[in-house]
Amino acid sequence: MKLIVGLGNPGKSYASNRHNVGFRCLDHFASQHRIPIKERRLRLKALKAKYGTGEVAGTPVALAKPRTYMNHSGAAVAQLVRRFGVPLDDLLVIYDDLDLPLGKLRIRQRGGAAGHKGIASIIASLGSEEFPRIRVGIGRPEGDEVSYVLSDFTAEEKDVAREAVATVADALHCILAEGIAAAMNRYN
């Protein structure tokens, strides 16, 4: 099984924020493959993520969105890794990246946090940087980074962001059907 996690902040007020591009990518992919992502319970307590399971390109998948805020994503991801018993090379995390131009993708098999607090939380919770990821460029602002990532895409940026979300879905399908090396060659 592959565990694919999109990062973002829960709640309607954050839904269109740049920081929630991971959620948007996962929602688009889930919709394409008719995999509903919903609340689940584990024994009498709620999981720290919503998820859905299905099959894509002959591969069983779990698609998940942490219910924690971005900076605490590690708790949810670690819980999901344990829940599904997946090795870290079968985990894939999708998230926003300030260091990439708007709409640009970067697929990697491993790496550090590079200042992304959600990824830093995951690395700390898992005790490892050895998990694949897809970084989605949101561009770097001139001013305050926190306000920027928590703001919505401008009217001019929405089309580029929408194309990036669709490209991530294509890249995910490629990863599942052909492997991460093929996706890196095709989409990086």
Image (cartoon, helix red, strand yellow):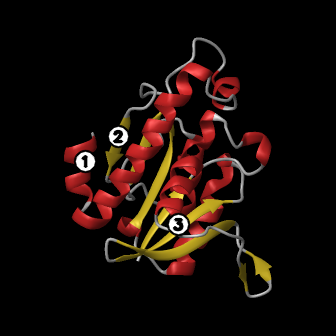
Q: What element carries label 1?
A: helix
Between disc 2 and disc 3, whose residue precedes?
Answer: 3
Between disc 2 and disc 1, whose residue precedes?
Answer: 2
Q: How far apart are marks 2 and 1 (CA)?
A: 8 Å
Task: State the quadrant of the N terminus.
Answer: bottom left
Quickly name the residue at label 3: 63
Q: Is residue 13 left or right of residue 159?
A: right
Crowding at dot 3, Cα within 10 Å, few <14 / some 14-19 / many 20+, comes out as many
Inspect this view and state whether residue 112 appears.
no
Residue 182 pos. (x, y %) = 20, 54
Residue 135 pos. (x, y %) = 43, 42
Residue type at the position of mark 2: Arg
Q: Is residue 140 left or right of residue 135?
A: right
Q: Give me the disc on residue 106.
A: 2
Quickly name the residue at label 1: 184
The residue at 31%/53% (across/down) is 109
Residue type at the position of mark 1: Met
Task: State the quadrant of the C terminus.
Answer: top left
The residue at 66%/46% (across/down) is 71
Residue 145 pos. (x, y %) = 63, 23
